[in-house]
């Protein structure tokens, strides 16, 4: 039988000394006090966000966008991308489990660059038609997933032993589906083009399948680990990067001499030890104090979990069914912090001879880093927490979502089909999370501009656009459709700041931030401010065909600004002032125009 062990893609022999911080001294104008960081204000019990996206009405037609490119992701508030070519469906077919469609040569790292090994699971020993649907075991004790920063040495040793035994399976039986390599390949197969459904590539990112797929993936991974160490109560640790104490690489993953099987040398060596992570990281480290970094992170968590996720479609992502192609549109948490954490952990370009962000920084290799599973355990925790925040925040109940299926092996090497509908409640699946504070709930950003910026003091949008490049901060005024809207009007339509016809160089890391009513002398690295509206980002992608253009047209980039205008007191203004601030690669961005519109969310 062919070996399923994953061969190395890049040199993993270089291991730098841990605990070497690369955080630079702050260039910020000011930083919040510790009391502001953790004890700011009273808890906000009222989330006044306008959204009319379906909350799961089974009779509502599905709308999806088939033009979204996975290389371009948004960090913004209510960021909507590529809304052209919307296809309404009278009916939709759920995504089926890909039990017979895996191509051993179909997975690619990027177009023209195939994955150098097969990502397919071990061959089935039964007819695919005979694969049963999974039923949960009864009488099991609830497994508790601990916070990674709070575990003790005994737990770390136990977790390392479980991974060691999983890796040993790769040697004793390369076709054992419980092996470390086989488990890592699951992510590659579902995410890098090995599977097809209805004649199209299957991609479980960039849609409403993101959360349920990874929940099922971790469910079986966790049970396999527990069975290998004869501990049915074993729970995966979650990396709680949403809390300041968890905003660094967990200690258990950074001790190569003590817990070697939890360590992955194919990580960014400058992000080890006590370095505070950036939940908005897209290839370039932010200059700031640890306190400012934590404050920025908590602000991003508030924006993504509360401001940007008032209803299911904005949280989970857009509908994905067999009638449409993959990548219809991602939800807020998949956008950030999910993707930035992947990139922050993965190798820098050409570090240890890794050219594609291996391991965590690329879908095909992410499962080879044990930190991947702890990262996604916290993503999974966000799903559970989000449903406790009130309002329209509840699970989707569309049948084409609930009846979508995946295919996994259990801890006894038996294949099973699983449905989305069976993973909506983590406690019914037999696990829960260790309780930890969530300070971002109270971290609604404060207005920092001392007064309203005079819209007549800056050029109007008609004199500013088109923009050939964003090589410096660009400020302009823009007229709103209406002002002084009632709450009923806000509930019916979301106010959107829309940038039309962007052209970006696909070879570059790109990020520019958007601020509203910000003073000209503002410190643009401070995101913990109400004036911060969001960011546009793009990951580099080089065509294997040199004859193809490197400039990609983007239909539109949108930010929802209803709540933001309330926060900074601009609801009654006819014109507002907008500033675009380049963070990386701004000189490779061109924008034709900008408008403000009212749209049903």
Image (cartoon, rainbow, N blue to C red):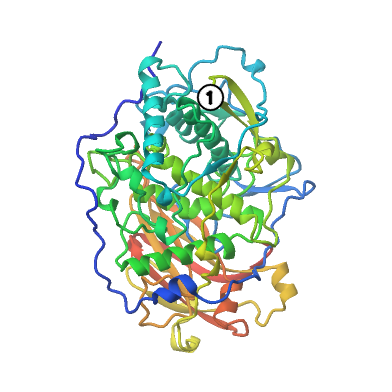
Query: At 54% across and 69% down in the image, what residue appears?
Result: 442
Label 1: few (<14), some or many (≥20) within 10 Å?
some
| Quarter of the view holding residue 475 | bottom left
The percent coordinates of residue 236 (x first, y second) are 48, 40
SS class, disc 1:
loop
The vertical placement of 370 against 27, above or below, is above
Front residue of this view, candidates 326 and 177: 177
Q: Name the residue nearer the viewer: 424 or 80.
A: 424
Task: From the image, tell me which residue sits under label 1.
Answer: 411
Q: Position of residue 391 (x, y in %)?
A: 70, 62
Quarter that holds the C terminus: bottom right
> Where is 601 relative to 61, above or below?
below
Q: Is residue 192 visible?
A: yes
For residue 151, above or below residue 530: above
Q: Quadrant of the N terminus?
A: top left
Res. 330 visible in picture: no
- Asked which quadrant contains residue 53, the reply is bottom right
Question: In this orientation, which residue lies closer to the viewer: 396 or 80?
Answer: 396
**On screen, 357 above or below 310?**
above
Q: Pinpoint residue 72: horizontal percent, then vertical percent.
A: 45, 51
């Amino acid at each position: 039988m062919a070996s399923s062990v994953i061969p190395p893609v890049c040199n993993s022999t270089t291991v730098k000394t841990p605990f070497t911080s690369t955080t630079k001294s702050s260039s910020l104008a000011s930083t919040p006090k510790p009391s502001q960081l953790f004890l700011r204000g009273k808890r906000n019990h009222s989330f006044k966000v306008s959204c009319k996206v379906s909350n799961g009405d089974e009779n509502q037609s599905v709308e999806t966008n088939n033009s979204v490119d996975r290389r371009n992701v948004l960090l913004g508030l209510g960021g909507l991308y590529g809304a052209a070519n919307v296809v309404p469906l009278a009916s939709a077919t759920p995504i089926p489990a890909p039990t017979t469609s895996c191509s051993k040569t179909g997975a690619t790292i990027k177009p023209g660059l195939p994955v150098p090994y097969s990502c397919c699971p071990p061959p089935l020993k039964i007819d695919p038609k005979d694969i049963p649907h999974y039923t949960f075991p009864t009488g099991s004790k609830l497994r508790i997933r601990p916070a990674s920063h709070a575990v003790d040495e005994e737990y770390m040793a136990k977790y390392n032993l479980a991974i060691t035994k999983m890796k040993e399976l790769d040697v004793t039986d390369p076709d054992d589906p419980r092996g470390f390599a086989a488990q890592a390949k699951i992510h590659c197969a579902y995410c890098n083009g090995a599977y097809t459904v209805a004649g199209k590539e299957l991609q479980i990112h960039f849609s409403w399948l993101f959360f349920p797929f990874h929940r099922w993936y971790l469910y079986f991974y966790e049970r396999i680990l527990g069975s290998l160490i004869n501990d049915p109560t074993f729970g995966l640790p979650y990396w709680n990067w949403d809390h300041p104490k968890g905003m660094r690489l967990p200690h258990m993953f950074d001790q190569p001499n003590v817990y070697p099987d939890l360590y992955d040398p194919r990580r960014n060596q400058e992000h080890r030890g006590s370095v505070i992570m950036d939940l908005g990281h897209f290839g370039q480290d932010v200059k700031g104090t640890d306190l400012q970094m934590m404050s920025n992170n908590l602000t991003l968590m508030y924006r993504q979990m509360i401001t940007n996720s008032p209803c299911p479609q904005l949280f989970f992502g857009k509908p994905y069914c067999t009638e449409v192609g993959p990548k219809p549109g991602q939800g807020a948490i998949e956008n950030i912090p999910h993707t930035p954490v992947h990139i922050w952990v993965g190798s820098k370009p050409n570090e240890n001879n890794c050219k594609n962000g291996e391991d965590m920084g690329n879908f095909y290799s992410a499962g080879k880093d044990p930190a991947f599973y702890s990262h996604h355990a916290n993503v999974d925790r966000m799903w559970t927490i989000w449903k406790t925040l009130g309002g329209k925040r509840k699970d989707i109940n569309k049948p084409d979502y609930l009846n979508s299926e995946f295919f996994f092996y259990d801890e006894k090497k038996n294949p099973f089909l699983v449905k989305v509908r069976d993973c909506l409640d983590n406690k019914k699946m037999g696990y829960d999370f260790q309780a930890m504070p969530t300070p971002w709930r109270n971290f609604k950003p404060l207005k920092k501009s001392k007064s309203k910026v005079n819209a007549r003091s800056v050029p109007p949008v008609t004199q500013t656009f088109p923009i050939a490049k964003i090589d410096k901060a660009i400020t302009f005024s823009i007229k709103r459709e209406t002002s002084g809207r009632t709450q009923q009007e806000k509930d019916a339509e979301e106010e959107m700041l829309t940038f039309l016809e962007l052209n970006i160089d696909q070879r570059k890391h790109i990020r520019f931030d958007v601020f509203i009513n910000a003073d000209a002398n503002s410190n643009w690295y401070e995101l913990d401010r109400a004036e911060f509206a969001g960011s546009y980002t793009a990951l580099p992608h080089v065509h294997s065909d040199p004859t193809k253009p490197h400039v990609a047209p983007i239909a539109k980039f949108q930010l929802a600004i209803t709540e933001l205008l309330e926060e900074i007191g601009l609801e009654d203004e006819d014109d507002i002032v907008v500033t675009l601030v380049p963070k990386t690669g701004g000189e490779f961005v061109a924008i034709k125009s900008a408008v403000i519109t009212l749209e049903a969310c």
